[in-house]
Amino acid sequence: MIAVVTVLLALPAGYLMRSRLAAMTTYAVAYLWAFAFQTLYLLLDSFGGGSHPAFEAGEFPWQYGVVTLGILGVGFGLVEAGHRLARRRHTVVAVSGRP
């Protein structure tokens, strides 16, 4: 879920929004919503006694935290890449004089 939000939202947010802060905030809010939803879904499945629970009772799921933190970092990188791509494209258009 958070990987899908990252792929679908991070690069376009950076490309389409002029403000880097607004793009980062938009991505962060969407990521945090998906993170909360995904975590709740995985916890309910673990409590419900699913056949392959994501979390084991008595264990701290540090691997889940590392993976989700990595996805967050990749998302911020994609927002930055989209912002730089848009800035570079607008600079090339302004220099060449083409719309």
Image (cartoon, rainbow, N blue to C red):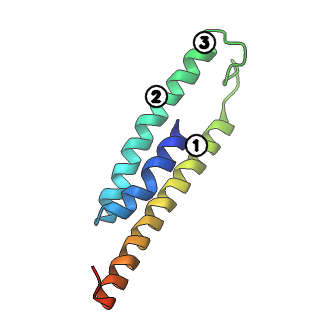
Task: Report the amino acid beneath label 1.
Answer: Thr
Residue 49: quarter of image: top right
**Residue receiving disc 1:** 68
Q: Give coordinates of residue 48: x percent, y percent.
A: 60, 9
Asked if marks 2 and 1 touch (Cβ < 8 Å), the reply is no
Task: Report the amino acid beneath label 3.
Answer: Phe
Residue 47: quarter of image: top right
Q: Give coordinates of residue 7: x percent, y percent.
A: 51, 49
Dot 2 or dot 3, earlier in sequence: 2
SS under mark 2: helix
Q: Residue furthest front?
A: 98
Q: Is residue 22 left or right of residue 51?
A: left
Which residue is nearer to you in this view: 54 or 7?
A: 7
**Residue receiving disc 2:** 37
- At x 33%, y 61%, the residue is 16
**Residue receiving disc 3:** 47
Residue 46's place in the image compared with 22, above or below, is above
SS under mark 1: helix
Task: Report the amino acid beneath label 2.
Answer: Phe
User: Which disc, if any, is residue 34?
Assistant: none
C-alpha span from label 3 to label 1: 21 Å
Asked if marks 3 and 1 touch (Cβ < 8 Å), the reply is no
- At x 44%, y 54%, the residue is 10
